[in-house]
Image (cartoon, rainbow, N blue to C red):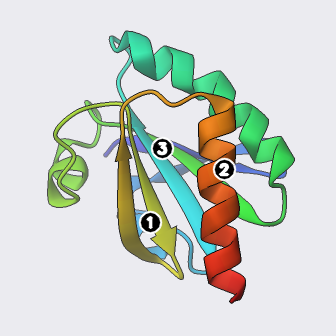
Amino acid sequence: MGLFILWEDSQMQAITAKDFEHVGDDTALTVVDFWATWCGPCKMQTPVLEQLDQDYAGQVKFASLDVDQNQELAQSLGIMSIPSLVVFKNGKPTEKVVGFHPKAALKKYLDGKLAEATA
């Protein structure tokens, strides 16, 4: 069973795909990055997400899932291209953002999602 990494307060934690059903249970928003080691844009997205993890500490959790190690899970969520970000609200997938996005664009997007979550 493959692993994905959950960043929590800048501490990376390995979690098995079997525990995926609990993603976002304890937070309003969780962003899961679906990627692969061979994907160039995925490698560009990772440092952006690490920065956002620090910027949104305590507000948004970020997770990273290797699609090659977790093919069934990726397919079940409709991941057809990478990088893809799936936004979970209260543990349920609500939106998908496909392709590389710079920090400013993701920050604007997340600010909007947080405003919706608190409205």
- Mark 1 or mark 2: name the one nearer the start of the chain: 1
Could you tell me if residue 10 is visible in this image? no
Element on which disc 3 rests: strand
Residue at 69% x, 46% y: name it. 107
Front tag of 1 and 2: 2
| Viewer-closest of 55 and 76 | 55
State whether residue 35 is above or below residue 112: above
The residue under label 2 is which amino acid type? Lys
- Mark 3 or mark 2: name the one nearer the start of the chain: 3
| Viewer-closest of 41 and 38 | 41
The residue under label 3 is which amino acid type? Phe
Badge number at residue 108: 2
Label 1: how many Cα within 10 Å (few below 14, some 14–19, many 20+): few
| Viewer-closest of 117 and 58 | 117
Looking at the image, residue 13 sits to the left or right of residue 1; the answer is: right
State whether residue 66 is above or below residue 97: above
Element on which disc 2 rests: helix
Report which residue position mark 1 lands on: 19
Residue at 77% x, 33% y: name it. 51
Label 3: how many Cα within 10 Å (few below 14, some 14–19, many 20+): many
Report which residue position mark 3 lands on: 4
Residue at 22% x, 46% y: name it. 79
